[in-house]
Amino acid sequence: MVTEPLFPAWRDTALDETLYECRELLEDTGFPTVARWRERGGKVLGHFQVYFPEEIAHAAGMLPVKLRGAPVEPARADSLFGSYLCSILKTSLEIALSNKIVLDMFVTHPICDAARNLAGIWGRNFAYPCEILYLPQNANSGHTTTYLRGEYDRLRRRIEEVAGAAVTDDALRASTEIYNTNRALLRDLYALKRTAPWLVTADEAYVLMAVGSVLPREEHNALLAATLPRLAARNAKPQDRVRVVFEGGFCEQPPLDLIRVLGRSCYVVDDDFLIGLRWLTDDVPLDGDALANLAEAYVHRSSYSPVQHDLRKRKEDMLLERIRASGAQAAVVTAAKMCEPGLEEQVTYTRTLDAAGIPYFVSEFEENMTSFDHLEIQLETFVENLLFE
Ligand code: SF4
């Protein structure tokens, strides 16, 4: 296991500099922390959105990396996909084809028709194992947890081959504990967004969370534990801004500048950005069967997204609950361009918000978009209407 910090730049810096360094790391398409890990002899498992049980790779001594696309031109990847597909599929492959990120194993999930084919496409281009983790399609069967535990076990054996190390139950428990700490810190970050959104802007909260996708969890935990109290102690006053929930960031990510624009107009008090990092909503138990505990948490104590189907968690009801729990006055309902699951859900969301009398702003985004003027004007008009009605 690599122990030297991969991302020391934020240590011993003022809060604004820490946030600056996180932003720099997040936007660096050379993925320096991943490169450093490999230089030190570590192995890397890249997994596509939305949720992946990183604990299993972590317990094998690998660095699990969440592939979330990148602001790059998919020059090589473009020819390997059909035309009418979202951007994240192409840019995630592009960074691998151009060696910006080098993996030892790739895992995707059948979250949509496009993503389910990723393992095949990657498998034709790379010599390392490219797997599909079949997360359950039916979360409401009595056999779901048993099935998922078996699927995690299959994955564990594959990871052991790649890592050259056994994933023992003790190692899994130790990793789960580290991830429990991470999820608790992220819950704290989101609690701050809800209770005092003037202390942390939307883009600051985003970068603090998102750098976890390219860091060992121990390092991310140290970063969050040191930064959250400093955010809470900031000398900032509440402003008269509309509180909104952002919905639509579960898979492809909006550009950071779009999130910044959003945060300039309103307080984003909750959202589904990179929801896979916060998918498990409670601590995973550390006693008993470690894989079964992870499977049980995925099925029974988890968030929601348009790509998981669970009759107990109707997405529109979950959105209303997110709005209620965060005290939001309105919703920003978006979807990535060409994202079928996201766009389909938009219809249900807006109907539900109409029925509940909750104002909303509908939009589309693409990770590589660079002009936000039009969107900012529309958003400001929406917000002013709410403030002055
Ligand atoms: S953004 Fe939508 S269409 Fe694209 S991979 Fe993700 S879920 Fe599938």
Image (spheres, grey):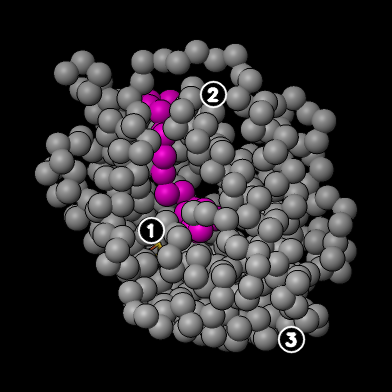
329 to 67, vertically: above or below: above
**Horizontally, is 72 left or right of 215 in the view?**
left
Residue hosting label 1:
304
The amino acid type of the residue labelled 3 equals Glu
Residue that protrudes farthest toward the front in the picture = 287
User: At 23% from the left edge and 38% from the top edge, which residue is drawn?
Assistant: 360
Whole-percent x, y for residue 358 in the image:
20, 36
The amino acid type of the residue labelled 2 equals Leu
Separation of residues labelled 2 and 3 (CA atoms): 46 Å
Q: Nearer the viewer, residue 111 or 122?
A: 111
The amino acid type of the residue labelled 1 equals Tyr
In magenta, the rendered stretch is 264-280
- Residue 161 is tagged as 3
324 to 102, vertically: above or below: above
Q: Considering only order in the chain, which callout, 2 or 1, is on the residue closer to the N terminus?
A: 2
Q: Considering only order in the chain, which callout, 3 or 2, is on the residue closer to the N terminus?
A: 3
Q: Quadrant of the C terminus?
A: top left
- Residue 199 is tagged as 2
User: At 70% from the left edge and 67% from the top edge, which residue is drawn?
Assistant: 173
Q: Secondary structure at mark 1?
A: loop
